[in-house]
Image (cartoon, rainbow, N blue to C red):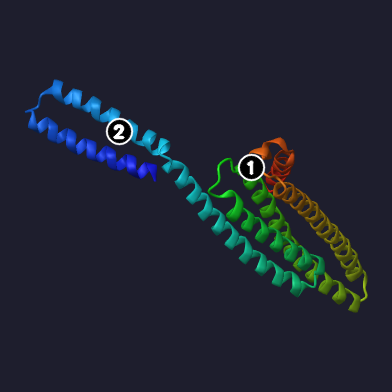
Amino acid sequence: MIKRYTLIAAVASLVLLAAFYWWFQGSLLATGLYALIAGFSLLTVPLMYRFAGYSEADDTQWLEEREAKEHDEMSRRLSTIRTELDGLGLIEGVRQTNLLSNIINDYHSVVETRFFGKANAPLTYLGAARTVQKHAVQNLADAVAVGHSMSTLSRGHREADEIANTEQQVRHDKQSELYGDQEGRLSKLFEENNQLFHSLTETAVEIANIKSLSDYQRTDAQARLVALAEIARKSGQ
């Protein structure tokens, strides 16, 4: 918003400067003095914009719009992931999807009712919590991919059982090994998510018990969640 206002002011200044130059018949001294005054006035636009509180209001509106958009996108993605996990028969994945949906909805409600429009809102915490949530969603999406690969391996396993020969036995053993690897990966994804859920819930409770947002800086919630978000961010690269 401030960029738009500054650009409008700059265009208006140039137009007026040209008119001033024409009015005074090309007087360089008068035009130069006017240009200095116009330039100084132009610099006051972003300063007045900030000091008058408009910048903070725009930042709050931008954050609210981004939060609403991210919440809607994550909710729709989780709904799709849940359907696929249910179709694959991954009960733990379905449970985690339901739990994460509740966590995201609770987070969205807290952001809307407690943080936005308030001074000293812990934006670092909000960003870190969202990063961890997105990582948990990605883990569930990865679980869907793993589940599909396990389903494919399982069908190949059954076909190998029906044809008993050396070549098929080798393939059978290889598929069994791959299936075991995928099972291990699936377990790690679910275990990591359980840890993420625990941290998100623990931190949310700590935040909810803070009487004043200014007291937030005196807790270890932010440091703990920021560290977790950094780990999630690196593992997603």
The amino acid type of the residue labelled 2 equals: Leu
Return the residue found at the far bottom: 162
User: Label for residue 42?
Assistant: 2
Nearer the observer, disc 2 or disc 1? 1
**Label located before the other in sequence (2 or 1):** 2
Say which residue appears at 40% left-offset and 38% top-offset: 52
**Placement of 126 over or under 172, stated as above or below:** above
How far across and how far down the image is residue 81, in percent? 69, 67
Nearer to us in this view, 83 or 171: 83
The amino acid type of the residue labelled 1 equals: Leu
Q: Which residue is mark 1?
A: 213
Looking at the image, residue 154 sits to the left or right of residue 60; the answer is right
How far across and how far down the image is residue 154, in percent? 84, 71
How far across and how far down the image is residue 132, in percent? 69, 50
Residues under numbered marks 2 and 1 in contact, where contact means CB atoms less than 8 Å apart: no
Say which residue appears at 64% left-offset and 51% top-offset: 130
Q: Secondary structure at mark 1?
A: helix
Disc 2/disc 1 C-alpha distance (Å) = 36 Å
Nearer to us in this view, 127 or 144: 127
